[in-house]
Image (cartoon, rainbow, N blue to C red):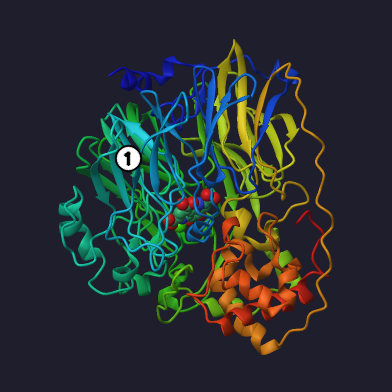
Amino acid sequence: APAEQSLLHAEDHPADWLTHGRTYSEQRYSPLAQITPQTISRLHLAWHYDLASNRGQEATPLVKDGVLYTSTAWSRVKALDAATGKVLWAFDPKVDGTYGVRGCCDVVNRGLAYWNGKLYLGTFDNRLIALDAKTGKPVWSVNTIPADADLGKQKAYTITGAPRVAKGRVLIGNGGAEFGARGFLSAYDAETGKLDWRFFTVPNPQNKPDNAPSDAVLMKTAYKTWGAKGAWVRQGGGGTVWDSIVYDPVTDLVYFGTGNGSPWNYGLRSEGKGDNLFLNSIIAVRPETGDYVWHFQETPKDHWDYTATQQIMTLDLPIEGQMRHVIVHAPKNGFFYVLDAKTGAFLSGKNFVYVNWASGLDPKTGYPLFNPDALYSQTGKMFHIFPGDMGAHGIAAMAYSPRTKLVYLPVQQVPDFLKAAKTFEPHPDGWNLGLDVEANDKMPTLKEQQDQAKDLAGWLVAWDPVQQKEIWRIPQPGPANGGVVATAGDLVFQGLTNGFFHAYRAQDGKDLFSFDAQTGIIASPISYMAHGRQYIAVLAGWGGSYGLNASGLARQKTGSINRSRVLAFALDGTDTLPPAVDPPTPALPPPATFDQKQALAGSRQFAIYCQFCHGANVEGTGVLPDLRHSAAIQDKDAFYSIVGEGALSQFGMDRFDKSMTPAEIETLRHFIIERAHQTLPAQTPAHAP
Ligand SMILES: O=C(O)c1cc(C(=O)O)c2c(n1)C(=O)C(=O)c1cc(C(=O)O)[nH]c1-2
Ligand SMILES: [Ca+2]
């Protein structure tokens, strides 16, 4: 089919960006070379397009025949003239605002797929929608969640990832393992939207068949790694396929990465059996049938949210004198893996950042050599873990240049403190990790926070995947930076959370270009050609997991206000951004009083239901309202109408009267007032709304 040919030969369309990682190999390398270290002094903003949203922007746009297609926060879609930024059409799937709380990490969307005149969009409320690429009109729409998945209470599915298309099938998974979810990957007929197959990543809780291609391997191999009881039976086990899905025409296999266990704590999750299949794994299946071919589990005994969902890239590399077709993978756990793409065999693995949960990998099998202290459900003690749950590498795409033979990898350090709960108490509409939430009762002092902040770091690392060795690293102002694109102009482009967009020389990382985007950048750039000019485009807009739940630690002097835009750069560009006007300095905390006992009780409710969006310890990061400044905390009824009854639900603030009693909701108010009194005077000034 012609559609198939165009994606198989995406390499031969240097002007376009036809699929999420540009080609099926997902190397994110553009063969365009107008912009080089020699010409870069002429690089300027060519156009910008303002997005009507103040939530995190993570999409990688697609470009075909002079049109740039992108998804945005809240699963909206824009088609823009790639040379001018003029809007051609827009589509809004109208996701209900109350869905906002069902995702762990902001209402983001990472991109679209294109195939045969249609675009494919996964929505935050789990629809897969085919749009006519010319008009933006829906062609078909399906609900991707099976009928027996209990939505909204114990389990909470969302789609944030980009679909991929292979052999006439649209492939999509979902997120939700922090709440409770059973992961799967579904394949739909690209023309009709009919479900073709669905591969579940963890067993059926009764070890029954699901009438799915995963049945045999789950019942025979995977089930015994879980145990019959354990919290997974109720929670779904996790293993969500929330980001990377790749079709490899060389092996004719589909690879996808699976997420963490649900709940995190395997002592409670699976009766202390930790090597639960297929959590934190790469799985290979046949594109036509979904039949299982191989798997490789990167993080057995997952306790740490060490998802293997990060970008899967295929490469041909000389290994011990022989060319091998391999998968290279840098998951959250901090190790860089090289696997044989056809068999999944472990070829090598090396840590690319400081890790303290394992001392290395078994050189034959790749099985981690665990630090026993990291197995916190077994020790019963708090563990200060590197990397933390954000991972050493998160949603930011990496890129490979065949010219330098290096992988350019956005690396971060955000350590975490983890302590196991003794019993599992699921909270509908809350995160359900099996962790000791009471550890949050003791608020960190300013000094403790400053000590913690010293460990926060981000780097761009150039990694030699053959030698498994770092060639250079550029320190950056902090973690959670955007992804990268590498070009034949020997440049690597990347936006940072502090709101600046950079170009680095591919050979040595020399910083050659910097642009003030006025907001943190967490998305991954692309390069394309329109009317004979090379463009670099990126979505700007602070948010995502770090942007929502990392507390005041994530706030920066620049970048921590969301100004969502599409930015496109070209040689001799003449556009400029309007001056950034910061919101007025927020009012001082209201003179409200609080009761210490109620505040303590409220701290627990806050840790369960609120902190992941509004920031730990009620310290906002700049994306969502900082509740310490909220006028509503002065009035019991006003507060209840928002938190209990959903007065702000259309903006993404769900109602919680089914999760908490009115008395519990009132304890939250006391806690927030207490935090307002105790933290605001001391905190470093930042651009928080
Ligand atoms: O376990 C899951 O189902 C799941 C889903 C998602 C998501 O869909 O965004 C993230 C994560 N986990 C996660 O662990 C994580 O660090 C993360 C970061 C982000 C983001 O968009 O910034 N999403 C997610
Ligand atoms: Ca997760």
Q: Residues within 10 Å of mark 1 (few under 14, many from 20)?
A: many
- For the residue pair 72 and 6, the one nearer the viewer reads as 72
Tell me what residue is drawn at x 31 percent, y 70 percent. Answer: 234
Q: Does the rendering let one see residue 466?
A: no
- For the residue pair 666 and 555, the one nearer the viewer reads as 666
Which image quadrant for residue 48? top right
Left or right placement of residue 199 versus residue 408 in this view: left
Q: Is mark 1 within 8 Å of ligand 1?
A: no
- Can you give x and y, in whole percent of width and height, for residue 582 in the image? 81, 48
Left or right placement of residue 429 versus residue 492 in this view: left
Tell me what residue is drawn at x 31 percent, y 32 percent. Answer: 190
- Can you give x and y, in whole percent of width and height, for residue 423 in the image? 40, 81
378 lies above or below 457: below
- Which residue bears the numbered disc 1? 255
Could you tell me how many numbered marks the image carries?
1
- For the residue pair 274 and 67, the one nearer the viewer reads as 67
Badge 1 marks a residue whose secondary structure is strand
Which image quadrant for residue 87? top right
Q: Farthest residue toward the top?
A: 532
Of the 4 image quadrants, the one containing the N terminus is top left
